[in-house]
Image: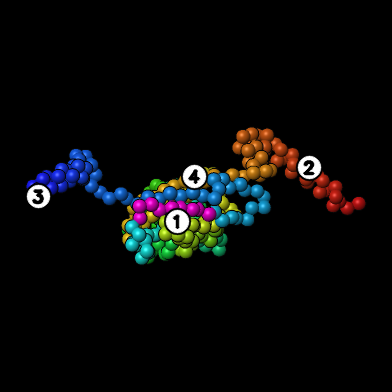
Amino acid sequence: MRLLAAVLTLLCLLPAAAGAQWLPGQSTEAVREGLEIGTSTSEIAITSDFHGADLTIFGALSNTDQLLLAIGQYDVVVVLEGPRQDATVRKKERVFGIWVNTRSMTFESVPHSYSMSSSRMIDDLTTPLELTDQGIGIDHIPLTPVGFVGDGSNLGEFRDAFRRLQQGGGFYDRNPSGVRFVSSNLFKASLRLPANIPNGVHTVRAYLFKSGTLITEESLPLRVIKTGIEQTITDAAHGQPILYGCAAVLLAVITGWGASLIFRKD
């Protein structure tokens, strides 16, 4: 009886053992964390009374380690990056009592605007080298000069000047507490759009860090367009420049002639 019971037990365990065996080509790595994001709108319309706006980004994490999540080992950085273009920084010096541009440097393909929010200070969530490698943060945006720059001794000066001008004009902005977890796996981020935000296709990027290491990122496009009379004028200026120029000159002539009639002295 004992032998029969042992045989029956062995037969019952064989299918389980067969199902648990490793198969060739099967990955032994654990499933990595995932990141999904969505925006409150996919298009920003700019009118004549546009004074800036707040963009809300919603996100969800998947396959997270609940223990690491509970002790705050997951961090999220969300960025709104504007259209890229070359940017020139000029330095003025006093020559014979007159301020003139003496030196300049052009940086290749830099974002016109850059707004960033994070779950905490980015310098606290990972190393500066990691931020520089990924180009995350205002201080780590790649600023590559165009052409010959000599010995490069003044490269840092022009880079600092470019960042200072962009931040002073409201184009570059950061909020170290703009990302907030509303539940264990859901977060909400807020980004500030300046009043002078450039037109074009912007990019929303979200980065997920785990214990200081970037593990995944996600991106979405965001269109910023002019509407109303501003868009009509812009389309006319780019689509029919000759007619636009003639209309501008005619409008100036009529305005000047009308002003002379109104304010002339009898």
Numbered range of the magenta stretch: 56-64
Q: Name the residue beneath numbered marker 3.
A: 2
Q: What residue is at 58 percent from the left and 47 percent from the top?
A: 44
Q: Name the residue beneath numbered marker 4.
A: 221
| Residue 218 vs residue 10, the one in the foreground | 10
CB contact under 8 Å: marks 2 and 3: no
Marks 2 and 4 sit apart, C-alpha to C-alpha, by 43 Å
**Local SS, label 1:** strand
Q: What residue is at 33 percent from the left and 62 percent from the top?
A: 67
Q: Name the residue beneath numbered marker 1.
A: 186
The spot of residue 212 in percent (x, y) is 33, 60
Which circle, 2 or 4, is nearer the viewer?
4
Inspect the image, locate mark 4, and give the three-letter code of the amino acid beneath it.
Pro
Picture layout, residue 204 above or below residue 247: below
Inspect the image, locate mark 2, and give the three-letter code of the amino acid beneath it.
Ile
The spot of residue 140 in percent (x, y) is 40, 57
Which circle, 2 or 3, is nearer the viewer?
3
CB contact under 8 Å: marks 3 and 4: no
Inspect the image, locate mark 1, and give the three-letter code of the amino acid beneath it.
Leu
Which circle, 4 or 1, is nearer the viewer?
1
CB contact under 8 Å: marks 4 and 1: no
Tell me which label, 2 or 4, sits earlier in the chain: 4
Which circle, 1 or 3, is nearer the viewer?
3
Marks 1 and 2 sit apart, C-alpha to C-alpha, by 59 Å
